[in-house]
Image (tube, rainbow, N blue to C red):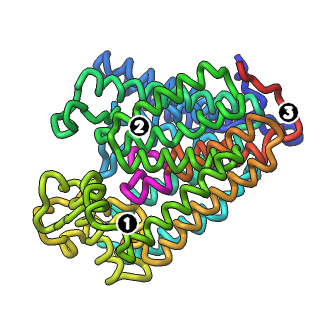
Amino acid sequence: MSLSLPETWVTRSPGQVVSGARFFAHHPARYGLVLVGAVLVAVLPPVYSVALIAVAALVLVLLAQPYVSLCALAFAVPFEQVRSFTAGGVNITITNLIVMCLFLAWIGRGISAGTPQLGPAPWRAVLLVYGAVLIVSVSQAVNYVDSLKELLKWGQLLFVYLAGVSIVRTRAQMRTLLLMLFLAVLAEAVVGVGQTLLHAGPSSFARGAILRSAGTFDQPNPFAGYLNMTLPLAVACLVEGVFSRRLMWLVTIVTGTGVLVSVSRGAWTATLAALVVIGFVTSPHARALVGVVAAGLVGLICLVLIGVVPSTVTQPLAEQFGVANVDIANPTPDNWAVAERLAHMEAGLGMFVDHPVFGVGIGNYPAVYSKYQAPGPWGPDLGHAHNYYINIAAEAGVIGFAAWILLLTSALVICARSYRRAPDALGRAIALGGAGVITAFAVHQFFDDLLVHSMEVQIALVMVLVSLAGYGVGRTAVEPEVGT
């Protein structure tokens, strides 16, 4: 029986039709794999044997259909914590396994074809520069396992991005992958909103009568951060009339509600920033409003600094945000969260001052935290500086900080260029929404570290779509717009 492969995953050379799946299927190692599998099925209990067969079947499907792997990653990122295991101090998740299958299929195709087949990848050079900087910083590390974890995140981001722009070949595939992102975020948002409505969660998440939602992310901040990695795309699709408006309103309202009930002020700020970017690009009225508001804020800040605005006005406002009279050595219940963030930021800044060039080693903030711990009740570290800009400066020095800023800036530039080059509403919506996603991601990183729960893979999927929207597939074939 012949294996039928999609046109998008077939590489043709003279007299040759190959794929990642067929490369492994014809490799002599297949006999050993079959033998090992047969022995395991024979000796394991029936439940484990069935599970092993199911996993093997899934792996074969992912190797044969790498586009399915990309779509599966859309759901794996939010739901990966449902099942995971640890090996050698490194947490292995379903996302890691799917990325590995994607990588093997992609490499297998490249080996079979003789030369790797790469799609348009305008972000590739900057990703490689960023990775090189992280690798150099490992020379300063004291805990290489933690460094390896961070390097694996960068590796997943790079592999998914390069494989994605090579695998997706048609506008229809772009639409399907985008739809998978929407369905995944809708499912995750429903879980989070349900937690708040049912008051199902730890008491520490309670804020008055409201229980903060955390979805499957264990904490409200990364949950809201994940939602903001898709919400701007839904808003952009509404603006450009892509997909059914009823579907896009459903995704926008439910996901926006999820961000709201997370009670994450960092996420709220990030959402607002993303909406400002989308409005600024698409509406002259919004541009005028943004200009007026920005000028007003600058003026207000200047008046506060020179003392024109009295403290009787600024003090209540600061208290509402929990940033008034914060003493990190003696925090109060009202400002505990802010004091905790400031304490970890202070520790990160201390690391940067002592190691300004290469940092303390990527992923090594926890390893050296005790040396820089701020005075006060700040026992075990949180694993990061609660501000990724400070965190990357502490772990990779000024060079790493510069590479991080370059990474974010280049992503926004690619979004802007894709928006100008896009031939249809789908491309414009993806590029516009992508700019909103990167903006939200960059803003939220001032308050937290969102490179957790494999969310670097989510960023990679978004940048795959953005790169192809203006640089890649189907740029001359304008598809009909759907607005009903």
Q: Nearer the viewer, mark 3 or mark 2?
A: 2
Looking at the image, which residue is at 65% across and 52% down? 288
Is residue 122 placed above or below 372 in the rendered structure?
above
Q: Amino acid at mark 2?
A: Val
Q: Earlier in the sequence, mark 2 or mark 1?
A: 2
Magenta: main secondary structure: loop
Circle number at residue 478: 3
Q: Quadrant of the N terminus?
A: top right
Q: Which badge, 3 or 2, comes first in the chain's sequence?
A: 2
Image position of 117 (left or right of 271) = right
Q: Please say whether residue 33 is one of the residues in the magenta stretch.
A: no
Q: How many marks?
A: 3
Question: For this rendering, which residue is in front, 8 or 185?
Answer: 185
- Front position among marks 2 and 1: 2
SS label for mark 2: helix
Q: Give the residue type that dot 3 points to.
A: Val
Q: Position of residue 218 (x, y in %)?
A: 29, 39
The Cα–Cα distance between marks 2 and 1, rounded to whole angstroms, is 24 Å
Question: Residue 31, how many percent across, how many down?
Answer: 54, 32
> Residue at horizontal 36%, vertical 48%?
265
Q: Which residue is mark 2?
A: 259
Q: Which residue is mark 1?
A: 391
203 sits left or right of 282 in the view: left
Measure the alpha-carbon separation of dots 1 and 3. Answer: 43 Å
